[in-house]
Image: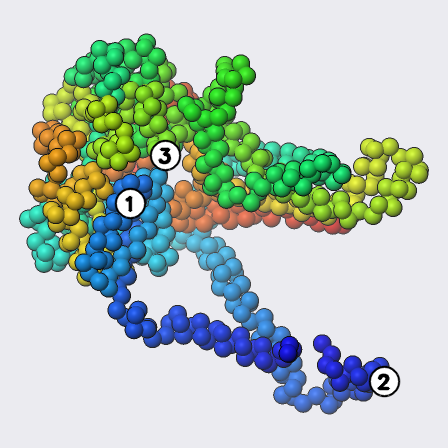
């Protein structure tokens, strides 16, 4: 930031300032200070980053090589044994991985498509569009555990609204214990996930749509392009940065999905809705298999990275 | 007048602020802080029970100025989420001074990991042994040592709607066959016989435990729980067959597997279900929520076995090994388990482990007390098995209910899990 005197001096002082910065005239103390100052400014954030991110990451990697209950002093080094168990001998881990993939496909594709459609619709000058924007985004700001409890009551087989509505409209034969059956439990939680997540891509796409210059659409109209051509050739390419964010975040969230499963089904019935994150939690905090749980956490991290990085790179290159 | 802040000035301000904050956190305590002893107390009681416990804590602070007990409650899931929280707090170096737990394997986990303080010196100092129910102390002892103070001896049975039973001319069942006949009558009358909440597993486990008591009998069942006998046997197959039949005949509210135990009481309160498998704690809840007590009563589930046993378990309060205020915590525990406080705050648990503290004007409490005196008891399986083996138990139970496992497959799978556990324990 320039001080008042420098402003007063004007452009004529520029050569003089350049001369002052010449290396030969900088004192060692001043140079050291200049090097140290940015580090001093960064130091608090760097310490927090090292303490709360880097250290736990390295620490969990070390824990994943142990058999340990998390409380006692008795720790046994098992090398890659925990990873071997997860990959080859753990049937629940396989159920969990399959559920994660199902969850990923459903909660990335459907909210993204719905969010895009809603954004395009609510980008028009419609009556009450601010209300609809807020109403659709609102579930996204609710705590996930609260969302899970609300939907658990909606799905309750005795007094839940879902079954009652089915009765009212004459479809009572489809009433079910939605969360209590392995056939429907995961799907029922996924519906909740879609309801909760759709507002976020809509918001991002709305921001993206408002950044598209109107001249593009006017030129397309003059060239005789129809609605679909305009959408395909102008809207979608301009929204590419938003696609990257929406899909990448959706994939990462899907791999580590926890809250809704935990609050709605607790991983049941019969482990049919376990995901990698809930299975990690069960092992870490209910079964005291800290090493095994840490290994599961690393599996989750590796899968997240494996899905997210190639996608982001390919989208950024275009 | 606004002034721009130089970099050095900003660093000085930031450093000063950090120093002040650190001094506030780690520096010499103020006079007010020195005078106050704060005890953190983790427990799982909520609703009216939690409110009444808070009244007790507040009263203790009034009669002991300078002692504040901070209540840290995790209600709603039983042990499933509450104990996770306590273990995480302990592992993270933020152990509460006192924490509530159950007996058996759930409490022993803290003893085995050296996280609970042995309380023998306090038992001797305060003479607790003379004032507590011996069975309650036996139920929490680990290798003969006491690491907690029992504050309740909970017992369970079948609570039923008296009006529904009367309307269908059903007498209290004295045999297992009579219980099933009652269920048939109730179902035919359009009332679901039993409401359960299967979300965390343990509510349904009570029914499985009961069926096993019926099919295997006390002696064999205790041996199976100790993993001294195989689980792949006809008695277990029959247990799971009973469970499957109760589900298939809709004697249990349909879709109950993902319902929380608290929500499972709603059909019972509304008269849509005739029974719930609950404990003595339901009495105070019925009274405090203003329900008509004439409509609710309970009976011990008939097992056709001698002795007739009901499911019972203790609640205890432990002092964390890491607590720096163990003496203050023990002082509170001594106050809390005195007959005067236990009678006054009886509804916190709906039972007590203090001798002579059952309120004489509480008909429910008196009846439970009689049952505990007359009948034998057995522990719930989740207070015997390790939590990982319990996870297998719940998964088999769910598999039977959903039809993914036949009773024979369920029995074989349980034995497989038990055998893996035996091998892991070197047995």
**Is residue B44 visible from the viewing direction of this image?**
yes
Residue plotted at (18% across, 38% down): B351
| Residue B353 falls left or right of residue B254 | left
Q: Which mark is residue B51?
A: 1
Q: Counting residues from the N terminus, which is met first, the one under dot 1 or under dot 3?
A: 1
Report the residue that reaches farthest toward the left. Answer: B130
Q: Where is B287 relative to A72, above or below?
A: above
Q: Position of residue B23 (x, y in %)?
A: 40, 74
Which is more foreground, mark 1 or mark 2? 1
Q: Disc 1 to disc 3, how far (Cα)?
A: 24 Å
Q: Position of residue A38 (x, y in %)?
A: 62, 74
Q: Which mark is residue B200?
A: 3
Q: Disc 1 to disc 2, how far (Cα)?
A: 77 Å
Q: Where is B119 relative to B354, above or below?
A: below
Which is more foreground, mark 1 or mark 3? 1
Q: Secondary structure at mark 3?
A: loop
Residue designated by label 2: A12
Q: Position of residue A66 (x, y in %)?
A: 40, 52
């Amino acid at each position: 930031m320039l001080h008042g005197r420098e402003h007063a001096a004007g452009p004529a002082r520029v050569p003089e300032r350049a001369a002052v910065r010449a290396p030969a005239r900088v004192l060692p103390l001043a140079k050291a200070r200049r090097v140290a100052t940015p580090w001093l400014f960064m130091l608090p954030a760097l310490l927090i980053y090292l303490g709360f991110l880097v250290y736990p990451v390295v620490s969990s990697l070390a824990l994943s090589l142990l058999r340990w209950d998390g409380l006692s002093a008795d720790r046994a080094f098992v090398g890659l044994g925990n990873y071997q168990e997860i990959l080859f001998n753990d049937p629940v881990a396989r159920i969990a991985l399959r559920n994660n993939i199902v969850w990923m496909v459903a909660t990335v594709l459907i909210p993204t498509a719905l969010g895009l459609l809603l954004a395009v619709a609510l980008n028009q000058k419609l009556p009450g569009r601010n209300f609809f924007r807020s109403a659709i985004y609102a579930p996204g700001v609710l705590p996930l555990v609260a969302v899970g409890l609300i939907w658990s009551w909606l799905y309750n087989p005795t007094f839940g609204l879902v079954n009652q509505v089915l009765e009212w409209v004459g479809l009572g034969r489809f009433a079910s214990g939605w969360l209590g059956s392995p056939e429907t439990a995961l799907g029922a939680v996924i519906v909740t996930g879609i309801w909760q997540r759709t507002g976020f891509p809509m918001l991002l796409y709305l921001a993206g749509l408002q950044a598209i210059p109107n001249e593009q659409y006017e030129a397309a109209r003059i060239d005789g392009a129809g609605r679909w051509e305009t959408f395909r050739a102008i809207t979608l390419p301009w929204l590419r940065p938003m696609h990257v964010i929406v899909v990448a975040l959706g994939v990462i969230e899907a791999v580590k999905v926890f809250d809704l499963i935990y609050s709605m089904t607790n991983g049941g019935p019969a482990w049919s809705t376990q995901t990698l994150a809930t299975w990690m939690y069960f092992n870490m905090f209910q079964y005291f298999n800290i090493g095994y749980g840490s290994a599961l956490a690393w599996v989750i991290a590796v899968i997240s990275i494996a899905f997210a990085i190639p996608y982001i790179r390919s989208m950024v290159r275009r | 007048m606004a002034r721009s802040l130089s970099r050095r000035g900003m660093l000085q301000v930031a450093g000063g602020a950090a120093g002040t904050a650190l001094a506030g956190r780690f520096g010499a305590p103020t006079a007010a802080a020195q005078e106050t002893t704060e005890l953190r107390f983790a427990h799982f009681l909520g609703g009216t029970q939690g409110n009444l416990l808070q009244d007790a804590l507040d009263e203790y602070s009034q009669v002991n100025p300078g002692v504040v007990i901070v209540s840290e409650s995790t209600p709603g899931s039983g042990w499933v989420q509450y104990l996770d929280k306590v273990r995480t707090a302990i592992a993270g170096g933020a152990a509460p001074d006192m924490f509530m737990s159950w007996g058996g394997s759930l409490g022993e986990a803290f003893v085995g990991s050296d996280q609970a303080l042995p309380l023998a010196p306090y038992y001797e100092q305060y003479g607790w042994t003379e004032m507590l129910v011996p069975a309650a102390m036996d139920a929490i002892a680990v290798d003969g040592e006491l690491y907690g103070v029992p504050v309740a001896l909970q017992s369970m049975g079948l609570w039923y709607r008296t009006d529904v039973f009367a309307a269908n001319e059903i007498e209290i069942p004295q045999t297992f066959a009579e219980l099933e006949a009652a269920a048939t009558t109730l179902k035919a009358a359009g009332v679901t016989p039993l409401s359960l909440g299967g979300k965390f597993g343990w509510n349904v486990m009570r029914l499985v435990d009961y069926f096993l008591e019926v099919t295997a009998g006390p002696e064999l069942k205790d041996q199976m729980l100790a993993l001294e006998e195989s689980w792949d046997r006809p008695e277990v197959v029959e247990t799971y067959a009973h469970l499957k039949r109760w589900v298939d005949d809709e004697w249990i509210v349909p879709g109950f597997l993902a319902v929380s135990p608290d929500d499972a009481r709603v059909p019972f309160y509304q008269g849509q279900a005739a029974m719930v498998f609950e404990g003595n704690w339901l009495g105070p809840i019925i009274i405090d929520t203003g329900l008509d007590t004439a409509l609710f009563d309970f009976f011990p589930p008939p097992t056709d076995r001698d002795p007739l046993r009901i499911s019972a378990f203790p609640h205890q309060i432990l002092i964390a090994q890491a607590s720096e205020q163990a003496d203050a915590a023990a002082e509170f525990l001594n106050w809390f388990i005195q007959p005067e406080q236990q009678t006054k705050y009886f509804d916190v648990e709906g039972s007590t482990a203090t001798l002579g503290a059952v309120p004489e004007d509480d008909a429910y409490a008196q009846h439970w007390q009689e049952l505990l005196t007359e009948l034998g008891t057995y522990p719930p399986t989740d207070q015997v098995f390790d939590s990982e083996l319990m996870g297998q138990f719940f998964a088999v139970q769910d598999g039977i209910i959903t039809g993914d496992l036949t009773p024979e497959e369920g029995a074989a799978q349980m034995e497989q899990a038990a055998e893996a556990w035996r091998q892991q324990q070197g047995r």
